[in-house]
Image (spheres, coloured by chain):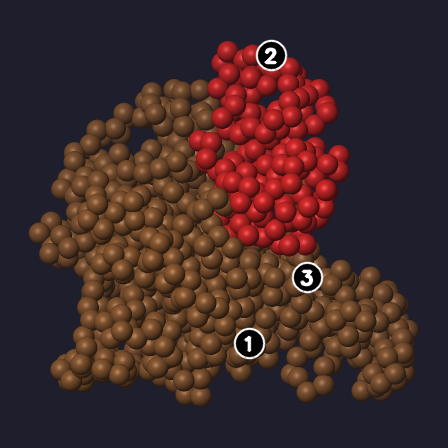
Amino acid sequence: MAKAELPLHAPGTQLDKGYIGQSVPRPNAQRLLQGRGTFLDDLRFPRLAHVAFLRSPYAHAKIKTLDFKAALASPGVIGAFDGRAVAEYCTPWIAVLAHLKGIKSPPQHAIAIERACWQGEAVAAVVAESRSQAEDAVALIEAQWEELPVVVDMDEALAGNTVIHPELGDNICFKRELDTGGVEEAFARAHVVVEDTFHFGRHTGVCLEGRAILADYNAAEHSLTVYHATQAPHMMQDIFSRHLNIPEANVRVITRDVGGSFGIKVHVYADEMATAALSVMLRRPVKFVADRLESFLSDIHAREHKARVRLACTRSGEILAFELDDLTAIGPYSVYPRTSGIEGNQVVNLTGAPYRHQKYRAKMHVVFTNKNVTCQYRAVGHPIAVALTEGIVDLAAQKLGIDAAEFRRKNLIPDDAYPYTFPSGIKFEKLSHQKCLEKLLQLMNYGDLRQQQETLRASGVYRGIGLAAMIEVTNPSPAFYGVGGARISAQDGATLRLEPTGMVTVMCSVTEQGQGTEAVFAQVAASAVGVTLDKVRVITGDTAVTPYGGGTWASRGAGIGGEAVLLAGRSLRSNILDVASQILKTDKATLDILNNEVVNRLTLETKLPLAELGRVAYFRPDTLPTDFQSELSVTRHYTPRQYGFTFTNGMQASSLEVDPDTGFVRLLKHWCVEDAGTLINPMLVDEQIRGGVVQGIGAALYEECLYGPDGQLLNGNLADYLVPMSGEMCDIVCAHLETPTRQSQLGAKGVGEAGTAGAPAAVMNAINDALAPLGARVSAMPFTPERILKALGKA
Amino acid sequence: MEHAVETTLTVNGTRVSRRIAPRQHLVDFLRDELGLTGSHIGCEHGVCGACTVRVNGEIVRGCLMLAVQANGCRVDTIEGLSDSGELKALQKAFHEKNALQCGFCTPGMLMAAQDLVVQKKKCSREEIRSHISGNYCRCTGYQAIVDAIEQVLNGQS
């Protein structure tokens, strides 16, 4: 008997195991494999109009005049609009949150009024019958500008000699300080103090599908249907409603297939709000799809940080304290509604977090600059915090002459120490750092690799091994955004319905962008109800159809949405058995559901196929007792509440070779051991981790949005901005531990960001390990050949 | 229409004639004029490979070729090769190994991979990686894609 066919109530477990833990292929992948998915740009509408934007060519400039005369005369043009015209229909927003004390940002409009604050900010819109006609007309807009002083450097922004938004007083969006006390004393009694300053380049998500929105206003109903490549349909419904002044019940957001998101598509973008407003203004459907060049200029960027970190430890290698000073720049606006203060905040929360020291002091500034805005992108703050932590930990180990693995073994929070509160205040329910480390070392044959490295060094081959311990924020409670006043749901819901044919339809508020969300919901639903996987259909991404919920972000889909599906599925199972008990005139307790049939619980003898039960319940309820009503649709919701976040932990390792003559890094292998609690579909988990690792490798080796001193983006295209391609990547070995969270019955934690969180640190440590015998060290990502050669004194 | 040029080509085995603007790219023509939306637009400057289609048996970037240049040509897209069954083995392997996540790169990736399959060569993982190195995938990390292609190539021998 295949595992999938085993009886569902595995003795001694909380779970209906069923498909949970099985690597089944994603049912919804078939359409994508035949090019028959429905991405936003694939939709066809009557009277569809297309918008193109005039974007500021300057990083900071006053808009003196915009002359639309020639543009309006251009073929196919329906209208041309400036910021004031669109502002009549769309109110501005200010991205602050109450729990980020003191955060400030100016109002941002759908289309800039009077002034552009970054190169690429939209300052006018042209709507035409085709996109090419709209673009032709944009080129005909006569714009006169007055250039203003630009602030591009983070330190200059902090110094505040030029203030971008004078009404705010300075360029500081947000600052935070944290001090456990006792840090000075710890550094004073330390035998060894190590310190370094790390730089992290700006990079961006580069979703293969550009941001995309199609807004369809119906003037008769004063209703707006928005087809949107978004991670958070309900959040966007609320935002369109409030800023376009349309009752929320009249706004429907539909999300079909989405071509990658990674956090890029969870924010409010001015040009997308403008598109929705234009649909209202023109009373017809209007579409905007960001092309690759405007994606680089207007998709959120992330990461730009400069951080000094210090570590104090004893001669025997016991870490006593960490100290952090982080500076990060976010462009001219905090991004709505999540704010751009979260990444820096996470860096403060998470730096040093796998280790058991108790003294910690941190200072962090978030500053405005005249570059594109930054906000939450996959792993938000984690890659910075993990690289700072693991970089300085390696430096300490090196200084003490202790092996990197041994140093971590001494200092990781012990597996029996939970629940545990880290000095920054974050709470860990249950982690498994020590087991993870040992499993990783075994998986990679650490000892053999070290020996091989030593041997090769003698022949002038410089290989490096880098380790990185990490934790990851997953399944956030309302503590992330809700407490700060954002209308961002931390709960999600699922409706399960038994169809007359015995099929089960699942409708869930968590969305799918390729992670396999719908597949894991199908697995959970099939297991919970007792049907086979082919009997389940999953619907997501429609505010008019699914229960209300937060959507997909912060590695929450499986843990929160999956739990809602599990709860609804168990309840539906019980309701189905109520119906069966009536039809069969048998005690419910003697019945169960297995492989699409009601069976005798003990003998597993078939009693009633679900298709027959459905027929009776829906079409012949007259045959059931008059006081009985079947309830074959069930909705359940779930919010994690016991902990602010359900942390996961993991450990990564990188093996690579540095060519000291060219500065090139060749990746040899990468390993990741991750503990994400209950694994629902190990194959999908592995692919989430591998994809995340490769994004992290991109950050470490290739990706950077380069700006000139005038605030011009220098490499805003896919030829000049390097992303990881298959040729440079290596195989990535994944292994797992399973420490289920006790907060939910499913026990699943999140896994979407772990790869990206840890990979940059592992690669950095491996490069520095390779360079160590040459007396060189790098600390500015990405580690380009040029930077490595400079460190070697060769460039 | 500005300077439209009468163009006739065979798309997925069907002859089509249209008056086409000379500046229209092949992929825009396939998507907008013929409704063949399986070929995707990722960068429009020839780097990402999402718009890969086959013209007279050779894989090309649909964003680097003008539609009028395809006059008299045989063009095959993901829809055609799916219906003919030519991609069946690759599609099955991609599905089983989860060699796709969001699926936006997948049609182009399959077209590139099929190019290796029709060459009937045995390839190492490095050669497979090199062959698809013009197709950008942000989701998977490429490993499952390499695994799937490797399975199909080895199955051929």
How far across and down, in percent of the image, does residue A120 sit?
31, 39
Q: Closest to the observer: A683 or A169?
A: A683
- At horizontal 38% and vertical 79% (from top left) the residue drawn is A409
A193 lies left or right of A409 = left
Q: Which mark is residue A738?
A: 1
- At horizontal 34% and vertical 71% (from top left) the residue drawn is A404
Q: Is residue A513 above or below residue A623?
A: above
- At horizontal 81% and vertical 71% (from top left) the residue drawn is A1
State whether discs 1 and 3 lie on one chain: yes
Query: Which residue does the numbered mark 2 point to in the structure image?
Result: B6
- The residue tagged with tag 3: helix, strand or loop? loop
How far across and down, in percent of the image, does residue A450 sit?
40, 66
Q: Which chain is brown?
A: A
Q: What amino acid type should be assigned to the residue bearing mark 2?
A: Glu
Q: Which chain is red?
A: B
In the image, which is nearer the foreground, mark 1 or mark 2?
1
Query: Which residue does the numbered mark 3 point to in the structure image?
Result: A24
